[in-house]
Image (tube, rainbow, N blue to C red):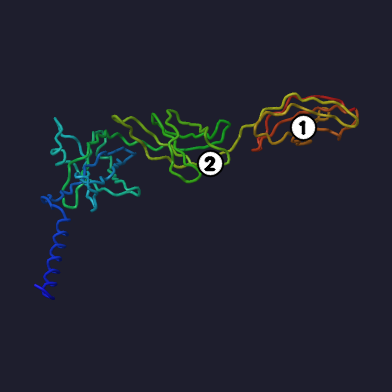
Amino acid sequence: MTGPRWRNFTLRIAGLGALAAVLAACGYVGDPQPPLLNIPEPVRELQAVQRGERILVSFRPPALTTEGVTIRRPLRFELRAGPGPEGAFDAQVWAASAPAYPVERGENGGMHAEIPAASWVGRELILAVKAVGANGRDAGWSPFAVLPVVPPLAAPADLALKNTAAGVEVRWQGAAPRYRVLRQEPDGQEAVLLDTVEGRQYTDATALPGRRYRYWVQAVQPAGAGEAESELSAAGEILAADVTAPAAPNGLRAVGGLGAIELAWEPSPEPDLSRYRLYRSAGEEVWVRIAEPESPSYRDQSIETGTLYRYAVSAVDQAGNEGDRSEPVTIPAP
């Protein structure tokens, strides 16, 4: 076979060979896989706490299905809370009578719910939640949370703040066995727990002078394995300040000279020293401030010959706190 007909036949054979090569490159398809069940994983941890007249519930929604696939479609959550049945616990019996409560998504992606505590006071409440996929399937209940519900705790009252030498003193009124003290930093971050105390006062020794803080107090009491808590007290705000006065200077001495009295004393060891205040009394007259030197010495030239003078000196820190005066010295003007 010659000519154009032979050439066309050759081209058709080459085309079939190329097609076979493409099909061979695709490999073996294998057996068909079953469809995904798309069942969300169960909620791993459920938290519940009584705060005043509310029971606060929170949990993280699952991110994967039971097959390890990322969940794409929104989930529905079924939260139930009710007393345990008499005798051995049966989840189906409990779920049949436990009321359901709505769940909302918080700003941080977590799920939250509030349950009124009034109807459960004096009883043990059992809570659980299940995540239900868009196809209506679920992997069962979360671990059950058991919460003894107690009479609501009153929030602490009459919060008072005061700057002291030891730090910011926080005082309040209440009758709870323990209290949490919380503080918010000046930059507006979330309040942090400083300490839990048994009395009705607390001193914040970590407050820095010149910074403004907000404080809250919360009452707590044991409830089962955990604690019930009150609502937060009203907030209190204060500008932290250094109110610790420096110690009195030591070693004040006076020497008469030509037309003046020379005064000197030991330097103050205070790290925040600003200056000194020098006081003088002529005879039995009242004390008068005559100078505020920055160094531990002074030359008093405003004197009258023959007058008996008394001198004393104090230290002043950078916050303006003035300490006690030194032991006075007495000298006649030359």
Q: Which residue occupies the foreground of this view, 155 or 124?
A: 124
Farthest residue, direction front:
2
Quadrant into which the C terminus falls:
top right
Tell me: residue 216, above or below residue 11: above
Indicate the secondary structure of the residue bearing disc 1. strand
Residue receiving disc 2 = 238
Q: Where residue 71 appears, x then y in whole percent?
A: 24, 50
Residue 329 lies left or right of residue 270; in this view the side is right
Q: Identify the residue at horizontal 29%, vertical 34% (top origin).
A: 150
Q: Where residue 38 appears, x then y in whole percent?
A: 18, 49
Residue receiving disc 1 = 279
Residue type pointed to by label 2 = Ile
Q: Where residue 251 appears, x then y in whole percent?
A: 75, 23
Q: Identify the residue at horizontal 47%, vertical 46% (top origin).
A: 188
Q: Earlier in the sequence, mark 2 or mark 1?
A: 2
For residue 82, which quarter of the picture?
A: top left
CB-based contact (under 8 Å), mark 2 and mark 1: no
Tell me: residue 75, above or below residue 300: below
Q: Which residue occupies the foreground of this view, 23 or 182?
A: 23
Farthest residue, direction bottom:
4
Q: CA distance from mark 2 to mark 1?
A: 34 Å
Q: Which residue occupies the foreground of this view, 39 or 261?
A: 39
Quadrant into which the N terminus falls:
bottom left
Within 10 Å of disc 2 (Cα), the crowding (few <14, some 14-19, many 20+) is: some
Q: Identify the residue at horizontal 43%, vertical 43% (top origin).
A: 190
Residue 165 lies left or right of residue 329; in this view the side is left
Residue type pointed to by label 1 = Tyr
